[in-house]
Image (tube, rainbow, N blue to C red):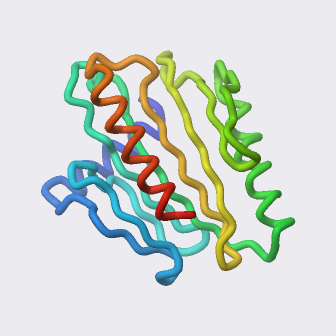
C-alpha cells in the first residue's frame, strides 16, 4: 500500500463512528461549504495550509481497491501573484503523476485530467479560487471506472459541483 492510502485508511479508522461531515468552516470562518451527509471526513489539518479530505463511499466492489475522495485545501497567499504560483505548483505536481493526461479545462483555474494511482486510472477535477488572500483548491478524485455505475458518478460530480458553488 502507498503512504497516501495508508494515511487514508488510518484516518478512516480514527474517525470510524464519527458523525458524517455536513457544514464545514475553514480559514477562520472565511471559507464555508457543506458536504453530502454520506461523505465521510477522513483527514483534517489545521494551520497553513489547512486541509479537509472526505471519502465518497463507492457501494460497489471497486471500492475495495480504490478511494474516491474530495479535498479542500486553503493556503494563505499575499496577492494574485502568490495565488498563480500556488496554482502553477499544484498543476506541476499533477502533471508529474503517472499516466497524466490533460482533459478539457473549463477556465483558467478549472482543470480536469486523468492519471494512475496504484495501477488504476482515476479522473481528477481541480478548481481554484482566490478569496480574502486565501488560495482555495477543490480537488475531486474518483476511479475512472466504477462498478457503482452512472448514478454514483453523477452523484459524485453533483456533490463536487455543489461545493464549488459555495466556494466561489
Residue 43, quarter of picture: bottom left
Q: Is residue 59 above or below residue 139?
A: above
Relative horizontal placement of residue 85, taking residue 70 as reference (left or right): right
Q: Is residue 1 above or below residue 38?
A: above
Relative horizontal placement of residue 127, taking residue 122 as reference (left or right): right
Residue pictured at 72% horizontal, 44% vertical: 107
Relative horizontal placement of residue 34, taking residue 4 as reference (left or right): left
Instruction: Check the image and name the residue furthest to the bottom.
Output: 28
Percent position of residue 164, x then y: 50, 55
Residue pictured at 50% horizontal, 16% vertical: 119
Front one among 9 and 99: 99
Percent position of residue 132, x then y: 66, 79
Relative horizontal placement of residue 109, taking residue 137 as reference (left or right): right
Front one among 113 and 76: 113
Residue pictured at 41% horizontal, 66% vertical: 33
Percent position of residue 130, x then y: 69, 67
Quarter of the figure that contains the C terminus: bottom right
Percent position of residue 68, x then y: 38, 35
Quarter of the figure that contains the N terminus: top left
Residue pictured at 42% horizontal, 25% vertical: 143
The total of numbered circles placed on residues is 0
Instruction: Check the image and name the residue furthest to the right.
Output: 81
Amino acid at each position: 500500500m502507498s503512504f497516501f492510502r495508508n494515511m487514508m485508511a488510518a484516518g478512516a479508522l480514527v474517525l470510524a463512528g464519527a458523525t458524517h461531515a455536513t457544514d464545514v468552516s475553514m480559514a477562520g470562518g472565511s471559507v464555508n461549504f457543506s458536504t453530502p451527509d454520506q461523505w465521510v471526513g477522513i483527514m483534517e489539518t489545521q494551520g497553513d495550509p489547512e486541509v479537509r479530505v472526505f471519502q465518497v463511499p463507492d457501494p460497489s466492489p471497486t471500492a475495495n481497491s480504490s478511494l474516491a475522495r474530495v479535498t479542500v485545501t486553503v493556503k494563505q497567499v499575499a496577492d494574485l501573484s502568490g495565488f498563480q504560483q500556488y496554482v502553477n505548483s499544484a498543476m506541476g505536481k499533477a502533471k508529474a503523476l503517472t499516466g497524466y493526461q490533460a482533459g478539457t479545462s473549463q477556465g483558467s483555474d478549472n482543470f480536469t485530467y486523468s492519471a494512475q494511482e496504484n495501477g488504476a486510472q482515476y479522473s481528477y477535477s481541480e478548481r481554484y479560487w482566490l478569496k480574502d488572500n486565501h488560495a482555495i483548491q477543490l480537488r475531486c478524485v474518483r476511479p475512472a471506472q466504477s462498478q457503482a455505475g452512472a448514478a454514483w458518478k453523477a452523484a459524485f460530480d453533483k456533490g463536487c459541483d455543489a461545493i464549488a458553488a459555495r466556494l466561489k
